[in-house]
Image (tube, grey):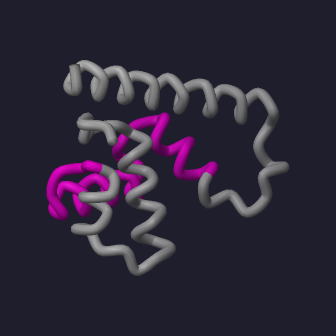
Amino acid sequence: MSRNPSAVWKAVVAWSMKSRTDASNGWLASALNLGSSTYVSKQAGLVRDGRLGTLATRFAKRLISKDPVDWSAQDNAEVAAELAEEVTKDVMVTKDVIA
């Protein structure tokens, strides 16, 4: 699991899980390696309020979209590429920590 608590994708997943399940902040902090339950709450609130940046907002919209047809193929590809880049950076940090 990643050691980069500021990874955008983690914050968006935490926000999504908080809004759709009864997962606790503590459980999410542990499962996503986000540090403390307070940090999870703060990050999820920033995503909810649209204050974590463009990538987070686009990813969040993608997760809650009920009609994926509303998203163009180009937009889907751009979001996927940006998220893949974010996850790749996160994995590289983890490899450096482990090594």
Q: Nearer the viewer, residue 90 or 9?
A: 90
Q: Is residue 25 left or right of residue 58?
A: left
Within the magenta stretch, is there residue 52?
yes
Q: Which residues are magenta?
A: 33-62
Picture residue at 61% right of the left edge, 33% below the top: 79
- Asked if the stretch drawn in magenta spans residue 72, the answer is no
Who is closer to the viewer here, 28 or 62?
A: 28
Q: How many marks?
A: 0
**Quarter of the C terminus within the rendering:** top left
Residue furthest right in the image = 69
Q: Residue at x 15, y 57 (%)?
A: 36
Asked where in the image residue 73 lies, by quadrant, the reply is top right
Name the chief secondary structure element in magenta: helix
Q: Position of residue 44 (x, y in %)?
A: 33, 58
In the orientation shown, which residue stands out farthest toward the bottom?
22
Residue 64 location (% of width, % of height): 61, 60
- The residue sitting at 15% across, 62% down in the picture is 38
Where is residue 54 shown, x and y percent of the image?
47, 35
